[in-house]
Image (cartoon, grey):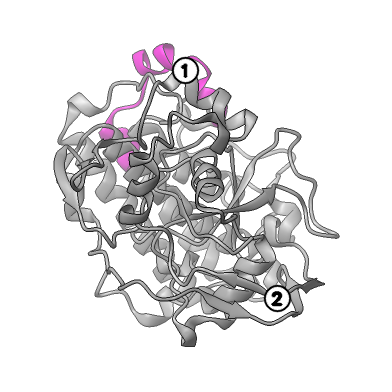
Amino acid sequence: MSDTPAILADAEHMRHADREWLSLALMQVRNQTLAWLGLFERHPEAVAPQPDTFFEPALWLAGHAAWRQERWIARNLQRGDGPVAETPRAPLASIEPHADTWWSSEALADRVRWTAASPSFEATRAYMAESLDVTLDLLQSAATDDDGLHVFRAALFDEDAAQRRFVALAQAQHLRAATALLPERRLHALREPLMFAAQRWTLGSTRGGYVPANEQWAHDDAVPEFEIDAQVIVWAQYAEFVEDGGYDEPHWWSAAGWQWLQPTQRRSPRDVEQLRHGVLLQRFGQLQRAPAVEPATLLSRYEAEAWCQWAGRRLPTEIEWELAASRGASRGFVWGQVPEWVAGWARAWPGGAAVADAPSGVQRGVAWFEPRRLAHPKARRFVAAERDEGFAGFRSCAP
């Protein structure tokens, strides 16, 4: 958003934000969540449960963001105790008696039942407004150290991250009006890949400010010399793979990727109508021709790996990506357009919290429409390899 104060869009600053900046940012992202809720309210045909379990109902997404914030803060007697307060042992009662049955994670276990007893838009908005007021009141009396502000920073990070779910849902439900809530995309001319010399790099984040669990903790590692694309793979490049029969040739796919591909019967990425003679996409309910230099998106990890195998390239490792994003901006390394698949699987850094047993891929970077304060070079997301609704793309490295 063009009217966003620069500090509110500064990823490093907002991880150390004080009470004043946190208050402004929490109000800003809640207004954005309310804007998405209003969009779906104006299009009731889009509120029905999706058969694709990737997508949660808009009413639940909006209420859930407020529910998590209230659970961490207003309902949490440990809210001043730092990271341990993210899992309250005995939360207090909600200001909304039905909150736990409407907006908890368990509430969606039976989607048909939830839809039959779902909250109204009016009730959801009222809860979102009232719970935020309580949060802001408690923020003004919170201790000003990292422990005292931790749950408020975590709540901001959580609701910022939820914005991608609204955009994915609007894309899946073909909501043309969604484009009014999205910033303009900037496209970049292709540049030659960049070389980085062998060196040591510190992966992960140091203590201080808000540090997401996936980034805990900083540790040094060696990085051999590598060559990495300056930009993510664009449609013109990905189309060559499709035109060469990439979706018909198992040689390019991992065993897991080929197994995922077969039931889908697809011959191109999600929501792509045509790749020959120009890229034609279904984008928020409209068929549009994508510029050749637009990043290829809505790709699974399996599709990214298959393209790399076909092209004689590979996905960058996490340490290669992080080093390039941190050191390569002045040399033309562009990121922040799409979340990017990288090599390797979800794992905790030394000293960090344990990772869930289910294997997940890793994404770095953010989508063009996500709050810029999420665009931190250390940030990492764990995403199942088959997920292709999150606007993810990729870049490649020399083998």
Kindly report the distance in space between the C-alpha atoms of the residues bearing marks 2 and 1: 39 Å
Residue 204, above or below 275: below
Position of 45 with respect to 12 (left or right) is left
Given the image, on which type of amino acid does mark 2 rest? Glu
Disc number placed over residue 263 in the picture, else none:
1
Residue 354, above or below 152: above
Image quarter where the N terminus lies is bottom left
Relative image position of residue 62 (x, y in whole percent): 38, 41
Query: In the rendered structure, which segment of residues is drawn in magenta?
Result: 105-126
Q: Quadrant location of residue 264?
A: top left
Residue 21, above or below 109: below
The disc, 2 or 1, on the residue closer to the chain's N-terminal end is: 2
At horizontal 25% and vertical 32% (from top left) the residue drawn is 173
Relative image position of residue 112 (x, y in whole percent): 40, 12
Relative image position of residue 95 (x, y in whole percent): 48, 39
In this view, the mark in front (2 or 1): 2
Q: Quadrant location of residue 218?
A: bottom right
Residue 391 sits inside the magenta stretch: no
The answer, for residue 17, to whether it is visible in the render is no
Position of 81 with respect to 239 (left or right) is right
| Tags 2 and 1 touching, CB below 8 Å | no
Given the image, on which type of amino acid does mark 1 rest? Pro
Q: Main secondary structure of the magenta part?
A: helix
Disc number placed over residue 225 in the picture, else none:
2
Under circle 1, the secondary element is: helix
Q: Residues within 10 Å of mark 2 (few under 14, many from 20)?
A: few
